[in-house]
Image (cartoon, helix red, strand yellow):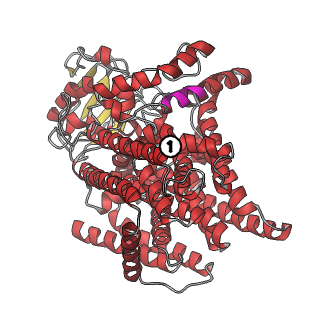
Amino acid sequence: MTAIYLLSFVLFVGYVGWLATRISRYSLTEWLLTSFLLFTGSVILTGFLLSALYLTSTTPAWAAGVFITATVIGELLRRLVPDRTPFSVRQLLQDRRQLLSRWYWSLRPYVKAIFTVLFVTLAIIAVTNLLLVLFTVPNEWDSMTGHLNRVMQYIQRGSMRHFGGTNWNMDTYPKSVCTLQIYSFLITGRFESAFRLIHHLSYWISIVAVFGIVQRIGSNLTASFFCALGYALLPNFLMQAITTETDIVLTAYLSVLLYMLFTYRQTRDSRYLYLAGMAFGIAYGHKITFTLLLPSVFVIMLYTVFLAPDFGQFFGRVRRLALAIIVGMCIWTLPTGYLKNIEVFGHPIGPPTALKHQSVERAGSLPNLVKQGSRNLVRYAYDHFNLDGIRNLPAGVSLNVQMRRPIVWLEDKFGLRLDEETDFSIMPFAFNRKFAYYNANPYWGVFGFGLIIPLLILTLLGVARSVPHRYLGVAVLLHFAALSYSAPYDPFKGRYFIETGLLGIPFLALLFLSPRVSVDKPGRVAGKAYVGLITVLGCISALLCVFCNIRALPFSWNGHESAFTAGRMQQITVGRPDIYIPYSRFDSIVPPNATVALGTINDDYEYPLYGKDLSRRLITINPFEKGVQPIPKEADYLFFARSVITPQPGDLRLGTDTTLREKMTVPGEDYYLRKLK
């Protein structure tokens, strides 16, 4: 049956591609982005419907259902498109291949050298990352406790209804991404790596969208490719390409939304307002942090849609866009779980504990929020001024420390107390962050502080003149501020700034569009040398991010084994090595098809307990803030932490590696196993 399901998947991808030819214009970028929108929109809607029918774990229902929803969505969009003539994708690919060849060979030697370095770097990374996605296992903290854990619960239960998990994320996070992961997992014959399909796809879709956005702004292939390649190598964006983190998927939706808005600005074709509304609804249904992007998105809408020559045109545009957004939110946002959160917890985000831990409520009074949020603004600015990737090496650390001495001196001179004030911080700010923080969660790296931020400043000061970039500059600042004031400082927050990076990366286009800063002209040796240096350092940074990522090492390095040769449990617990021994003992004792009751806590890894084939049934008996529940009769074993359940004679102590506890940010518990049958 797996072969049949895989065939249906291939046919579905081809089908949404065909539907996209009836909606998009003759553009490779637009066809890819429209296909992505149809693919995700169809799967998410199918998932909502199957959950209501308790068919979430039924693969044939998925295989057939996605075709039905895709047909309905595609037909509705087609009726809104004035030009309904489909085009040949094969001919489109041939045309673009020829265009790419002509463009590359027409470049000046300096520019050609830069692009050769960028393309070679991306090719190496692309192959490496694809292999890592296919032949290693996920091991991100949030997925081990929440994201993938709840996906398995939904599959076991046959529905995505609220059930009360150990970790609050299992019930409170929006469920749209779960539909994409469940579909990918089931349709590929329960292939675990398929959980990362949507995330890896989002990486490439975002790159394509950046290319398209810059094309709509400047109609310059060189500028568009430079921005797209630069974004592909931004450390924080690049690092999520092989993970199951949700931010990169939100970035893909945002990138499609921005592309549709900028394309509407260029064409005044209403189809892009409808597609923008669809992307808006899917993005908001994906993650509540899209709220923090609303001011930035509004600024872009102001430039691309709302500025009209008269009130009549303004009203018509607003009416069509507003209607599209309302419909999009009704279909893809409301069913995703926000309403259930309000019903259960009284808030769309989740329980009060979650709000106080990682939301604006932690700041207390408004004056304190302004004060501490302003500190966060400076803290994150400091965090962006790092040689991310390069400082994975000892020599890079030394260079990074020397480079940052002036700004550290400034902080002390002005008495900002960035590292001393901690009441609005999940973890305290530090000028020299721990390796574990910046290795897995970098920021923009050298491309950021070397090119993006300087060009943004030059634009806002009027040196580099570009109207769309001024609006983008305001959008960048608004999102930067939103991240700083909306939640406590978190050293792992580099991943949240990939959306800010999406808004900022088009500033690289000014190096080929703005006469005052362009490097694509004779002379300007100093400027060319500087851009060349930053480009080379950016490529080195990206390569080191991939090849020195201890969570997914392509090759053994610095005492850590390659992810390709390490055992499954060793890979999964690489971020929490103190729990490797108890989890390995559990895995060796408990049969793969056993039913296990879990007396664990919010921070415990539960996903590894499903086993290599993800075949064990796990039942939570300590749901978040509900207290310990009775052990279900169908349970064969009880896995528990001593802090949750008191051991009794006969229980097997699995333990935790106490020699590593002091090195752990969050140490593992003292684990036990009880045989019930």
Residue nearest the viewer, comparing 584 with 666: 666
Residue 381 within the magenta-colored segment of the rendering? yes
Which residue does the numbered mark 1 point to in the structure image? 451
Q: Is residue 223 above or below residue 129?
A: below
Residue 356 seen in render: no
Residue 283 location, x and y as percent?
Answer: 55, 54
Hey, which quadrant is residue 588 in on the image? Answer: top left
> Outermost residue toward the front?
523
Q: Residue visible at 43% across and 38% down?
A: 446
**Callout 1: 10 Å neighbours few (<14), some, many (20+)?**
some
Task: Kindly identify the residue that appears in the image at 17 percent across and 44 percent down.
Answer: 564
> Which is more toward the observer, 557 or 71?
557
Name which residue type carries label 1.
Leu
- Inspect the magenta stretch and tell me whether residue 158 lies in it: no
Residue 421 sits above or below residue 580 on the image: above
Most extreme residue toward the right is: 311
- Indicate left or right for 393 with 366 as reference: left
In the rendered view of the protein, which quadrant contains the C terminus? Answer: top left
Q: Image quarter for residue 13? A: bottom left
x and y percent of residue 169 in the render? 47, 38
Q: Is residue 575 visible?
A: yes
Query: At 42% from the left edge and 74% from the top edge, which residue is drawn?
Result: 17
**What span is in magenta?**
378-383
Quadrant in the picture for the N terminus: bottom left
Main SS, magenta region, reads helix
